[in-house]
Image (cartoon, rainbow, N blue to C red):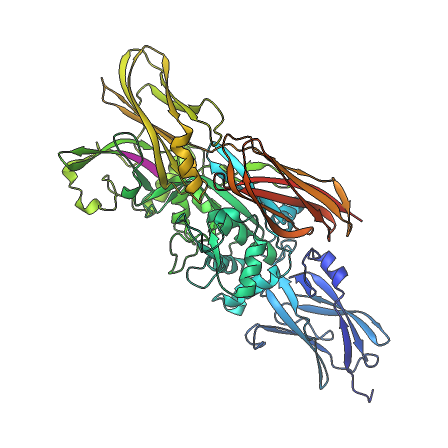
Amino acid sequence: PGTDLKVTAIDFLKSENCRLHHTDAYNIKNLVVRRGKPFELLLTFSRELNAADKLALRFGIGENPMKIRGTLFSLNPRREKDLGGWQISIVKNNGKECLLSVTSSPRAPVGKYTLNVKTGTNTYKAENDAVYLLFNPWCEDDDVFLADEAKRKEYVLNDTGYIYVGSAYSIHPRPWNFGQFEEFILDACMYLLDNSKLRLTSRRDPVLVSRAMSALVNANDDNGVLLGNWSGNYSSGTSPMDWIGSVLILQKYYKTKKPVSFGQCWVFAGVLTTVMRCLGIPCRCISNFNSAHDTDENLRVDVYLNERGEKLNWMSVDSVWNFHVWNDVWMKRVDLPAGFDGWQAIDSTPQEQSQGVFQCGPCPLKAVRDGDVYLPFDSKFVYAEVNADKVYWIVENVNNEEKFIKISTETQGVGVNISTKAVGENRREDITALYKFPEGSREERESMKKALSFIRPSGMGPRTHFASIVPTSNVDSSSGDLREPVPKTGLQLEITNKAALYPGNPLELAITVKTSTPGSRTINLTSSCQLQSYTGKVEANLGYVKETIKLEGISETQVPLIIAADTYMKVLASAEDELLILITAIAEVQETKEKLTKETTMSFAYPPITVQMPETAKLNEDFTCDFIFKNKLNVSLDNCKLLVEGLGIFKMAAFDEGDVEPGKILKSKIICTPTRLGEKKIVAKLTSNQVKGISAEKAITIIQ
């Protein structure tokens, strides 16, 4: 064996390894493998490998890999396994070729590894051949192990999905392309890991990695991916409404290394889902309807109404968003007492600082449900989002002084219909029961009691932006316990719409007052209609109605509230956000002075986009996709843009369609060449000045 042993080539056997590791979809030339699972390498030597030859494969991560730091793993097939829990063995030694099997530790740091092979005094460097090591939900010893194959397909491998938006009783699926396998996305995630403050060895821990990524997806502290903007002015970037997926955002960020403008909560959650799935952590988007914000952890949101029943925004320090989107990630919590494994909430929308940084989670869903809100991370914050009370106050002007009168406390309105996409199906799954016990149940009361022992409930007075100057003599809060029961007035309010709420049509609304107990009553009813953004910010007061009604015995009456189209169309066309219709009703029984409030948010209805294309197409053969939209509204849609994207078929494209008059049909066509096999989805979105987002999608199966 006098001649030196040299490595002349390494074959990473990419297609076989990637198939076995469920990484064959990544659009990257490198080998991508998951930790804790064997992969094979074919080494070619200058001569046959003998028993006496020295051979070591050295996998290193970071700038300066060192064994002592746990960032360098030196594997020798003739020695026992490496201290870091990695293993290597010779599968077949045949002439100059040697087939090796390598298994990384299921606790290895994730990231980009370089490989050097040492044979005696010679070192072969695998240049430009970094091996990407990811979390492994298929491996029982990995903290992110998920036992169900259908769930792994959805939460790790599905690159499309829905984010649920709208309002609590009018929920819409918004198609979203996660695109975790597209070009540069994996590299963008590696760049984020490098930019995080995490030590290399901390990258083994999905708890720390998911927390770091919740910070890095927003741009607030660390030059992260997305700049949040809720101002209503997006002219210096892309409106949050104009994204249909994460791919363009992460590609642009990776290319410029600067935050991308602009995001709102569903965009942050969509991008964080992409990053988590790309790294191999099971993840899903969660929509919480009637989500409490900025409650200062006092579990209360104060809503101020004027004497017309219109919500006064400028007084509030806290708010209830129509919906808020965050993420759940799946992992073991070895850092916590037993019982808190499974789904954890993380949130990358910048709302409140946690340990000095805009980050949130991971917080075990079980801790939120059981009221164990002392557990890390940020469980008090998440608890308040799904459990706060809403306290309604009327602000009256008495001798030029503002007087606050408390009219009601709603204990069940916040945190309803918590939604995510169902596993393997295109439908909504309600997961409220994972976040909270049924309203009014014994478990809910016990959980609340436990939570309140860790959260300081506020005093009974209102919190306003200038609460310090409200003398207590001006506050009538008819004191009581924090969770006071709703007064039994024998009265019920219902708010309905008599016709579909199409932009350009009058909004035909009605308030129904019902009595359920005998006796005669005189009722003062006040009801208002406003337009607001999804964060609860009022954009316009559209009108109100005040009536006095007499009801005898068990009966009901209906009061119409009709808003003419020209009252709201200007606001709708000039706003850059998608606006919702807020209706608030206040009823006061003259005889007993009892008051009742009811509020409902409704979404506008839109005509659909149709996507026409074949059900199947052949790989690398063109097919045509048509997008058809008929403007069935009574108003012209100005400055229409059609946004389309099909992962594995074509990159995102935008078409300017100009103004579309009432009754006019818009047709666009795109010629596509599919580059990947399997079921693919094409997503389309139409935006205009008047209507911010009409979405459609269609699936196509690509065959050989």
Between residue 62 and residue 678, name the one nearer to us.
Answer: 678
The residue sitting at the left extreme is 399
Between residue 532 and residue 58, name the one nearer to us.
Answer: 532
The main secondary structure of the magenta stretch is strand
Quadrant occupied by the N terminus: bottom right
Please determine whether, in this image, residue 677 is positioned above or below residue 82: above
The residue sitting at the right extreme is 95
Question: In percent of the image, x 38 and y 60: which residue is there?
Answer: 355
Q: Position of residue 53 (x, y in %)?
A: 77, 82
Q: Position of residue 442 (x, y in %)?
A: 41, 33
Question: In percent of the image, x 38 and y 56: which residue is there?
Answer: 353
Q: Position of residue 2 (x, y in %)?
A: 82, 89
391 left or right, relative to 375 = left
Between residue 56 and residue 259, name the one nearer to us.
Answer: 259
Range of magenta residues: 389-393
Between residue 140 and residue 248, name the one nearer to us.
Answer: 248
Residue 392 among those drawn in magenta: yes
Count of residue discs: 0
Please determine whether, in this image, residue 461 is positioned above or below residue 129: above
Q: Quadrant of residue 630?
A: top right
Q: Position of residue 145 (x, y in %)?
A: 61, 53
246 left or right, relative to 348 = right
Please determine whether, in this image, residue 625 is positioned above or below residue 376: above
259 left or right, relative to 292 = right
The residue sitting at the bottom extreme is 2
Can residue 651 be seen at all in this image of the molecule? yes
Can residue 343 be seen at all in this image of the molecule? no
Q: Quadrant of residue 305?
A: top left
Residue 669 among those drawn in magenta: no
